[in-house]
Amino acid sequence: MTICSTAFVTLGRAQASALGRPDLPIAVIAHPFGLRTREEVRGIAEQCVDDIARLVAGNKP
Amino acid sequence: MSESAPNSARFEAPDDLDAINRLYRERRWSDGLPVVPPTVERVERMLRHARRPREEVVARVAPGFGAATVERIAINAVLAGCDPEALPVLIAATEAVVEPQFNLQGIQATTNPVAVWIIVNGPAAQKLGVNAAFNCLGQGAWANATIGRALRLVLQNIGGALPGEMDRATQGQPGKFTFCCAENEAANPWEPLHVERGYGRGASTVTVVGAEGTMNMNTHTKDAGELLRAFAETMMHPPSNDYCHGGEPWLALGPEHAEILSRAGLSKAEVKRRLWEGSKMPAGRMTGKDLLRVQDSRGAELGKIGPDTLLPVSHRPEDIHIIVAGGPGTHSTYIPSFGNTQAVTREITE
């Protein structure tokens, strides 16, 4: 699996298909990060960590 | 054994230029400019200048990893309006961009405006009419315009880097339409680029560069030291991928500026060394966030990096590259790189 921000999902999907893995699970996180504080980014990570762990384990959310 | 891929699909199209261009526009097979219809006859004429079979895969082009067969490269060359004799340059350029050190994946999919700049050296440049003199980075020379455009179409149509899809450039740059010139070897007081990079003087080569853009440097000084200082200060550029990662910036020196440096007894290597020293930039000129990025990217190379650390633009002086290009005048061009890329040179052998 991989993690993309919303602005890069199109690229992520197309890239996965080009590499022969069109069903690759992609966790999507709101874009952008650049304007957020480290604390805000940490908060986002805590919100989505369970979903990402599920994707790593091979179960779709 | 070399890889091969099926011949390209054929479309029946009306014998009407407007209708054909509408088809290319709808399918996003162009760069936004009208194309030359790649009829069977035109593609065949182009293919007469290839030594390899049409179905041979020259390269797999990131980020879509489409198969760049000889035939598909020829089709894109026709679309761009290339003379058939230019096909070998495009085949060599396609081979060059997929070398791992060029980092085509990054260059094609990044938000950075990076374009691929093609430099042609050796007898092929003159034979094909690639302009190395007046306005060599501008309009007016058929070979410069069409060869650069054809490589862009290869990158987009075969590599799949469509703007807004896999090409994620925030703004891009005009050089993404076309960016090609020759080196003005006759006006170069030093060895030309291809000789510096290990090829014989009589060889013809193509060099590809991941170029962020062009910055003109107009100075009337006749003093070599002042000239180098002006160049070095232009290179210092805080929001720069070169300083962030240690890159490969380029200078296209106008012949008059090159002569000033040469008359002062400076070799090309010494010019690079002095530019490298003179362009060291205090890391504190970067924004706080960019200072964190450079600490991540260059900590292993430079050790602890603080605001007073002097950042070199590249890992080594020899990573600054110099060509001589253009006609008379007091102008040279600084061409910063994408940072995470190394230029690649290939001999034109077809």
Image (cartoon, grey):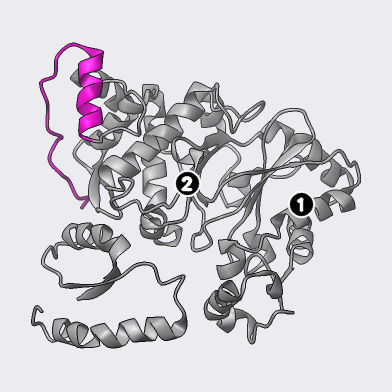
Provide the major secondary structure of the magenta segment: loop
Magenta segment: does it hold B5? yes
Q: Residue furthest top?
A: B15
Marked residue chain, label 1:
B
Label 1: which residue? Answer: B231
Image position, residue B55 (x, y; %): 18, 39
Image position, residue A4 (x, y; %): 28, 69
* B293 to the left or right of B304: left
Q: Residues within 10 Å of mark 1 (few under 14, many from 20)?
A: many
Image position, residue A19 (x, y; %): 19, 62
Label 2: which residue? Answer: B115
Inspect the image, locate mark 2, and give the three-letter code of the amino acid beneath it.
Ala
Distance CA(mark 2)–CA(mark 1): 22 Å
Query: Does label 2 or label 1 sit earlier along the sequence?
Result: 2
Q: Is residue A42 visible?
A: yes
Number of disc labels: 2
* B259 to the left or right of A21: right
Q: Quadrant of residue B91?
A: top left
Marked residue chain, label 2:
B
Q: Is residue B206 visible?
A: no
Identify the residue shown where x is 74% and y is 62%: B279
Identify the residue shown where x is 40% and y is 60%: B106
- Depth check: give the residue in front, B189 or B152: B152
- Depth check: give the residue in front, B159 or B41: B159
